[in-house]
Amino acid sequence: DVKVTQSSRYLVKRTGEKVFLECVQDMDHENMFWYRQDPGLGLRLIYFSYDVKMKEKGDIPEGYSVSREKKERFSLILESASTNQTSMYLCASSSLAGGPYHEQFFGPGTRLTVL
Amino acid sequence: AQSVAQPEDQVNVAEGNPLTVKCTYSVSGNPYLFWYVQYPNRGLQFLLKYITGDNLVKGSYGFEAEFNKSQTSFHLKKPSALVSDSALYFCAVRDQAGTALIFGKGTTLSVSS
């Protein structure tokens, strides 16, 4: 089974702190994604990566950056956390081989609270 | 632009009754459609997908979905609901670039005993 793991289930940070959210997948997937989930808004794409050191902005990249130095690991960085970044963050991965119809596999999520 | 709509925030159904969770979509080109379920404080779990072929797609946990091209819908169904089906359900469509997914806002399914 595909496994996507996230470094923390719950995280509490203070405004202005630099925050790192880590995601690791074990299925050699090319694509990796970061979403944030907020009630009534569904999932919104922050950034995705289709290869090592490659990244693309999603719908809401402001205030975030990402890093992908190794194929299995995709990090989301909040350079200076703000209270409006309090949210559930979900990492996902998918295979590139075979076209656009592969499902994404999700990690358990990190619930981040910024005080 | 691709988009997905889930017109109901919440669906309530009694255990044993059939359930339907609605989804409509807007795409340019071929639609690649997905349903996911999320249990409390968990990540999303894949249920089923439509790529091409038969309009009735069967998935995990007894769920199925009916693709209707003329109505641009992809409703999730189950013949007999269980209390354990209570969860948040998301419909999604593949984006135009064929990489990311565009999600609906989600529908909370509540099954009462």
Image (cartoon, coloured by chain):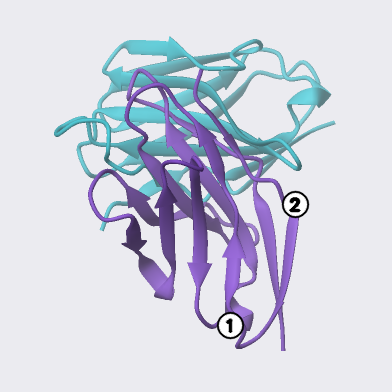
- Alpha-carbon distance for marks 1 and 2? 19 Å
Residue B56, above or below B53: below
Residue B82, disc: 1
Chain displayed in purple: B
Q: Position of residue B90 (x, y in %)?
A: 56, 49
> What residue is rendered at 63% in x and 82% in y?
B83
- Marks 1 and 2 in Cβ contact (< 8 Å): no
Q: Chain of mark 1?
A: B
Residue A79 makes an appearance in the image? yes
Residue A106 makes an appearance in the image? no
Left or right: A43 as drawn, with respect to B65: right
Give residue A55's quadrant in the image: top left
Residue B9, disc: 2
Left or right: A58 as drawn, with respect to B86: left
Chain displayed in cyan: A
Q: Position of residue B92 (x, y in %)?
A: 49, 40
Q: Chain of mark 2?
A: B
Q: Are marks 1 and 2 on the same chain?
A: yes
Q: Position of residue A56 (x, y in %)?
A: 42, 12
Label 1 sits on what residue type?
Answer: Leu
Residue A50, disc: none
